[in-house]
């Protein structure tokens, strides 16, 4: 079990009391250490993604726009709630690099499971930042896996917000099996992820969106979870990505679900079991959202513990 959580990775975050602050990483690490988990895990280091890495998914125009805004540290990267700050290009590139490094360890046999807390930036589009996400490390990862001949690839997202940046980038793609449980977009950003959105063209039937009503709890999550496992069992992915945002836990300031860390443990444990049954064992978990620091520490460490036990 590999965990990449170093101080440099924790530099991805926004200033001035922004919900996605750099203290999120420290909250995870404190609980990680309190549970004695570092002694049970392999430790990896983050790295900067190269331009070639970023351009696997993102347009050159977007990459250069972020680079320029990173120098001045002025303005918004998405015209809304993703502000530029000095060094944001390097911080966002490091998130991508950490995700790629974790995936490479799984592919090369250095580990069978991996977790990266500050990662899973699922809102960024190919040509734009969005929703606190400057670059989409998941999109870059999927394109890297395809280039290495890995497929099909499963992307499972339990963040409270719909993973729109990943969904629409691969909506018509037959190589990407997509499953997303999230709060109904009627009540929450980004307003997408309706149940009838199940893929287009070659991707038809390979995408599963499960919107949950406000107030949905662990019981509601567990009742729908078998649909995710069933989809993946039918299509036998050769690599599984879990975006395990903690913002679905009760008390998150930006959302309205009432999950506990038990749902995150359930997702991690059953996906790891599926990966083993498929014969490759590869599961990469990415932290995603979560804006109550106690919640994210509990949920993410529940994921690590579940992966260690599976």
Image (cartoon, helix red, strand yellow):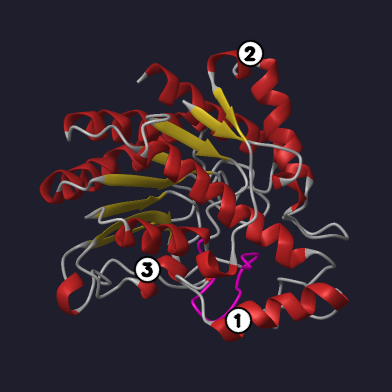
Q: Residue at x 58, y 53 (%)?
A: 97
Residue 107 colored in magenta in the image: no
- In the image, 18 versus 57, the foreground residue is 57
Judging by the rendered image, the residue that carries numbered circle 2 is 36
**Marks 3/1: CA–CA distance:** 19 Å
Furthest-left residue in this view: 234
Q: Is residue 123 above or below residue 106?
A: below
**Marks 2/3: CA–CA distance:** 36 Å
| Mark 1 or 2, closer to the camera | 1
Q: Which residues are magenta?
A: 122-134
Q: Position of residue 110 (x, y in %)?
A: 42, 30
| Numbered label attached to residue 285 | none
| Numbered label attached to residue 62 | 1
Q: Residue at x 32, y 71 (%)?
A: 170
Q: Is residue 181 above or below residue 277?
A: below
Report crowding for label 1: few under 14, some 14 to 19, many 20 or more residues within 10 A (C-alpha): many
Q: Residue at x 16, y 66 (%)?
A: 205
Which callout, 2 or 3, points at the residue further toward the start of the chain? 2
């Amino acid at each position: 079990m590999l965990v990449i959580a170093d101080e440099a990775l924790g530099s991805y975050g926004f200033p001035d009391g922004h919900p996605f602050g750099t203290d999120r990483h420290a909250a995870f690490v404190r609980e990680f250490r309190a549970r004695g988990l570092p002694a049970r895990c392999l430790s990896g280091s983050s790295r900067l993604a190269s331009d070639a890495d970023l351009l696997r998914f993102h347009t050159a125009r977007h990459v250069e726009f972020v680079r320029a805004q990173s120098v001045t540290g002025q303005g918004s990267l998405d015209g809304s709630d993703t502000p530029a700050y000095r060094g944001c290009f390097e911080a966002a590139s490091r998130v991508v690099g950490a995700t790629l490094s974790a995936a490479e360890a799984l592919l090369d046999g250095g580990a069978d499971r991996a977790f990266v807390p500050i990662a899973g930036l699922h809102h960024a589009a190919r040509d734009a930042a969005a929703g606190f996400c400057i670059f989409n490390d998941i999109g870059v990862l999927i394109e890297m896996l395809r280039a290495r001949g890995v497929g099909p690839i499963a992307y499972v997202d339990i963040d409270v917000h719909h993973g729109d940046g990943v969904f629409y980038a691969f909506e018509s793609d037959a190589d990407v099996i997509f499953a997303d449980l999230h709060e109904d977009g009627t009540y929450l950003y980004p307003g997408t992820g309706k149940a009838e959105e199940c893929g287009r063209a070659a991707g038809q039937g390979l995408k599963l969106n499960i919107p949950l009503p406000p107030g949905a709890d662990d019981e509601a999550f567990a009742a729908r979870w078998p649909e995710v496992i069933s989809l993946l069992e039918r299509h036998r992915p050769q690599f599984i990505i879990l975006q395990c945002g903690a913002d679905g836990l009760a008390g998150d300031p930006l959302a309205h679900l009432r999950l506990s860390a038990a749902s995150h443990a359930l997702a991690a444990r059953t996906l790891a079991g599926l990966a083993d049954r498929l014969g490759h064992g590869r599961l990469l978990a990415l932290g995603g959202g979560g804006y109550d620091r106690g919640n994210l520490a509990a949920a993410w460490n529940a994921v690590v513990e579940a992966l260690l036990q599976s």
